[in-house]
Image: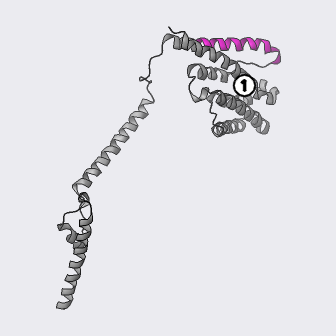
Amino acid sequence: MAAFSSSSSSYISHIVRIRQENHNALPLRLRLPPSSIGTSMDSGIRRRPTSESQSRTRLGVGVRAAGNLAAGTSNWDAWKPDLGSKAPSLSDIFWPSAGAFAAMAVLGKMDQMLAKKGVSMTIAPLGAVCAVLFATPSTPGARKYNMFMAQMGCAAIGVLAFSFFGPGWLARSTALSASLAFMIYTRAVHPPAASLPLLFIDGAKFHQLKFWYVLFPGAAGCLLLCLIQELVCYLKDNVKF
């Protein structure tokens, strides 16, 4: 019995010595107090975290709390005007507004010429295009590729949806979802173009155009608006007041 107790004590001392050697090999900042090495093995009690680990835990909690607070602040900022940007000058307001007036005036004159055919160039999507081109010319939605690709593609989708499903909610839902998928896939996101399929499906006067609707009035109107946009951008840059 005494021999068994002696061998057990020798085994435990051997294990403690090995753990002490491994402990000494660790970097100084990761070492535990030497007195806790044998105690943690013999009693099976979990080691208490060091003061450094506690500090890191508190720091992590603080960082997460600060991140949540910042996220909440940014969410509220979306409901406020952009006060960090420079206030627009009078010319920055006047020229885009004048460009929109000129665009609608020219389109209205074209409507008079096309009145016998029962179609109109003054459609709601072109009003949204004016806002994009004249007010935010540097945004992705104002790129010429995005505009023409989206206008023509979404118009074609509207014609196809009407051909397959006729007028109604199914055609509108299918056309709108397909238009969004098309713009994302072609990297040609242009928000006003999403209304073209709905305009065709609900506008009986456009049904006679069939696939000519791809070019008229959306694409043709955008071509005119691009020309006016160039004039508006030139005046904004060179005629300031």
Nearer to us in this view, 116 or 56: 56
Q: Is residue 241 above or below residue 205?
A: above
Q: Is residue 85 above or below residue 11?
A: above
In the depicted view, which residue is nearer to us: 231 or 221?
A: 231
Helix, strand or loop at label 1? It is helix
- Inspect this view and state whether residue 46 appears: no
The N terminus sits in image quarter: bottom left
Where is residue 115? Give x, y as percent.
Answer: 79, 14
Q: Residue at x 45, y 28 (%)?
A: 79
Q: Which residues are magenta?
A: 97-121
Residue 111 highlighted magenta (yes or no): yes
* Residue 104 percent location from the top left of the image: 67, 14
Would you call the spot at circle 1 few (<14 residues within 10 Å), some (14-19), or many (20 or more)? many
Residue 218 picture location, percent across and down: 71, 24
Q: Quadrant of residue 77?
A: top left
Q: Residue at x 66, y 24 (%)?
A: 125
In the rendering, at what x and y percent does residue 138 appear?
56, 25
Image quadrant assignment for residue 128: top right
In the image, taking residue 209 as reference, residue 29 lies left or right, namely: left
